[in-house]
Image: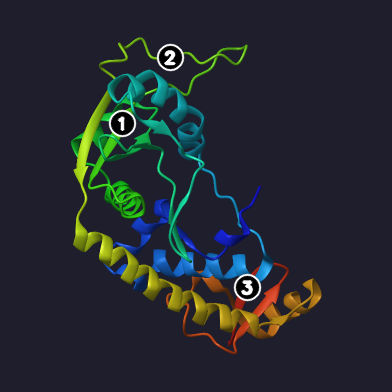
Amino acid sequence: MMNLEKLGGVGASEVGKLFTKEGVKSKTAMTMAFEKAKELIFGYKKNITTIAMQHGLFNEEEAFYEVVKPCFPNSTFRSSDSVWINDNLWATPDVTDDVEGITLDIKCPYTIRTFFKNIDKLPATYIAQNQCQMLATGHRKGMFCIYLTSNQIDEFGNKIEYEIDINKRHRFIPLDYQEEYGQEIVLRVDDFLSNRDIILGHLSKANELSDLELFDLHLNSKVTRFQDKSNLLAWEGKIVRNGTDYYVKENK
């Protein structure tokens, strides 16, 4: 069930998009601001689920009980329990251990190459996510469980697991909370939401076109998908809508 309170807001798994080289001005962040504005307009969230995301969701509970719980007996699996940082920012930790003061995130790569790539150097998006999770829980110690598990199944739907000892195909990687990082997350989300609101205002003024009107528009004007433009803040008054899709109309 969709949590309507989350529409237009930012979860910990998305925070990394605001920490690229160009920050909230990056194309990645602008595209996300566009998607968040659309959530507010249409009242639902578009579920973008990659194979890797599906694999992680299906296997994180297994990772908890097979690997995390034996090492952290006081830990709790809570991947559906979000913690609000403010009205527009939340985190959903996979695991917390209030006795040890640890917020733990589970990652489940399904290729050996990706497993070693992740443990050799944690992706910046992972670090941003765990920092945001710690900001939410108040813990000062973070942790990653990198758990290699197969995505192969047999003809009966049973997983064909790697023939590698489970103690060899997981790693725990600690991460300390950084106060400045946590403060920067809040600041960047605020800046991001300002861009979202500007785009929301522009989209709300878009003229809605029928299929025939959009077809005819292509005959007389230069028409570009809104999300393909480099600066999504610059097209007020030139945006049109067809269904849930937005376009920019320019002179040829």
Q: Are marks 2 and 3 in contact (CB under 8 Å)?
A: no
Q: Quadrant of residue 109?
A: top left
Q: Are marks 3 and 1 in contact (CB under 8 Å)?
A: no
Q: Is residue 108 visible?
A: no
Residue 193 against residue 167 in the figure, above or below:
below
Label 1, on which residue?
Answer: 146
> Callout 2 environment at 10 Å: few (<14), some (14 to 19), or many (20+)?
few
Residue 161 against residue 13 in the figure, above or below:
above
Residue 125 lies, in percent from the top left, at 32, 51
Residue at 55% in and 49% down: 48
Q: CA distance from mark 2 to mark 3?
A: 44 Å
Q: Please state which of residues 74 and 196 is positioned toward the viewer in this rendering.
A: 74
Residue 143 lies, in percent from the top left, at 26, 38
Q: Quadrant of residue 236?
A: bottom right
Label 3, on which residue?
Answer: 246
Q: CA distance from mark 1 to mark 2?
A: 16 Å
- Which sits earlier in the primary sequence, circle 2 or circle 3? 2
Q: Amino acid at mark 1?
A: Ile
**Secondary element type, mark 2:** loop
Residue 40 against residue 138 in the figure, above or below:
below
Left or right, 213 with reference to 66: right
Label 2, on which residue?
Answer: 161
Q: Please state which of residues 194 and 94 is positioned toward the viewer in this rendering.
A: 94
- Which sits earlier in the primary sequence, circle 1 or circle 2? 1
**Secondary element type, mark 1:** strand
> Callout 3 environment at 10 Å: few (<14), some (14 to 19), or many (20+)?
many
**Secondary element type, mark 3:** strand
Residue at 20% in and 59% down: 179
Q: Amino acid at mark 2?
A: Glu
